Image (spheres, rainbow, N blue to C red):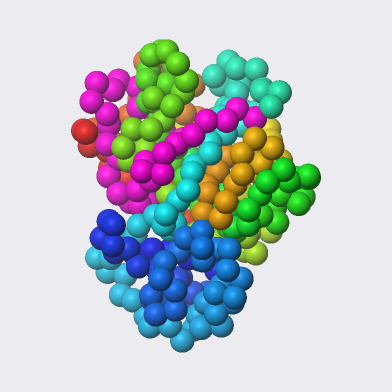
Amino acid sequence: MKLLRVGTAGAERPALLDAEGVLRDLSGVVPDIDGALLADDEALARIRAAARELPVLDPAGLRIGPPLGRIGKIVCIGLNYHDHARETGAEPPAEPVVFFKAPDTVVGPNDTVLVPRGSTKTDWEVELAVVIGRTARYVESAEAALGHVAGYAVAHDVSEREFQIERGGTWDKGKNCETFNPLGPWLVTADEVPDPQNLSLRLWVNGELKQNGTTADQIFPVGEVVRYVSQFMTLYPGDVINTGTPAGVALGQPEPKPFLRPGDVVELEVEGLGRQRQELKSA
């Protein structure tokens, strides 16, 4: 299934995109798309059974919000593609690099992204997001870990590189600026993504292709990422993991590096998971 949330920010209602691409209203079946729903097999079964009978929504002028409400935590994996490690001159990590984004960085897939005040190095990163559907605690194998995944989505891990790298401390200062995690348009359930290690990722800035990668290049595949993270923290339904970005970010380009500026337009997609478009403005 392709689950999504539509409407004004803070007042989104649940919806579904059916097999024919028709947008349908889910608000009469479930109150929202969140961790509670993803952990409820009976509720998901009701949605599947009712899909073709749900009221049709007119998508014209209808904002698409983040496909997941009440996100618990966003765990991010850094330097998780071989080509991205090479372009930044970093050694491939021996273990996953873990950092966090606050849930309040999440906006809709086509919402405005704000360039922070004082920023000179705002950067782009297309990523595969993993959405947890079953509590994961000390999972024993990568194969078992995939059974804890409810679905997948497109994430834009916007980053401010000066704040991240040059201002001391951890990466978090460059990762948690407002609007720095557009998510969606859809949450695609795991049954529609048979192999998360066989997805293409692309990103364009002002129409120019910048990133063109594949999840096959991940250093730590999705199952291993979920297994690994579960050794250090409990993952709950509604938690999100951003699994890293392929080569092609501004940080990896020759000088002068083409960091983002107000007025730029970024478009990105992950195969089968939909497409995002954001215009950048000043905070």
44 vs 102, left or right, is right
- Against 235, is 66 above or below? below
The reply to whether residue 277 is visible in this rendering is no
| Highlighted magenta segment, given as a residue range | 96-125
Q: What residue sits 30% from the left and 20% below the top?
A: 120
* Residue 238, percent from left and from top: 51, 54
Q: What residue sits 42% from the left and 21% below the top?
A: 164
As for residue 34 lying within the magenta part, the answer is: no
Q: How many marks?
A: 0
* Residue 184, percent from left and from top: 44, 54
Q: Quadrant of residue 128?
A: top right
The reply to whether residue 62 is visible in this rendering is yes
User: Which quarter of the rendering shows the N terminus?
Assistant: bottom right
- Against 134, is 91 above or below? above
Using the image as rendered, state which of residue 84 and residue 4 is in the foreground: 4
Using the image as rendered, state which of residue 55 and residue 277 is in the foreground: 55
53 vs 244, left or right, is left
Q: What residue sits 65% from the left and 35% below the top?
A: 232
Q: Quadrant of residue 203?
A: top left
Q: What residue sits 34% from the left and 76% below the top?
A: 57
Using the image as rendered, state which of residue 232 and residue 196 is in the foreground: 232
* Residue 186, percent from left and from top: 46, 59
As for residue 124 lying within the magenta part, the answer is: yes
User: Which quarter of the rendering shows the C terminus?
Assistant: top left
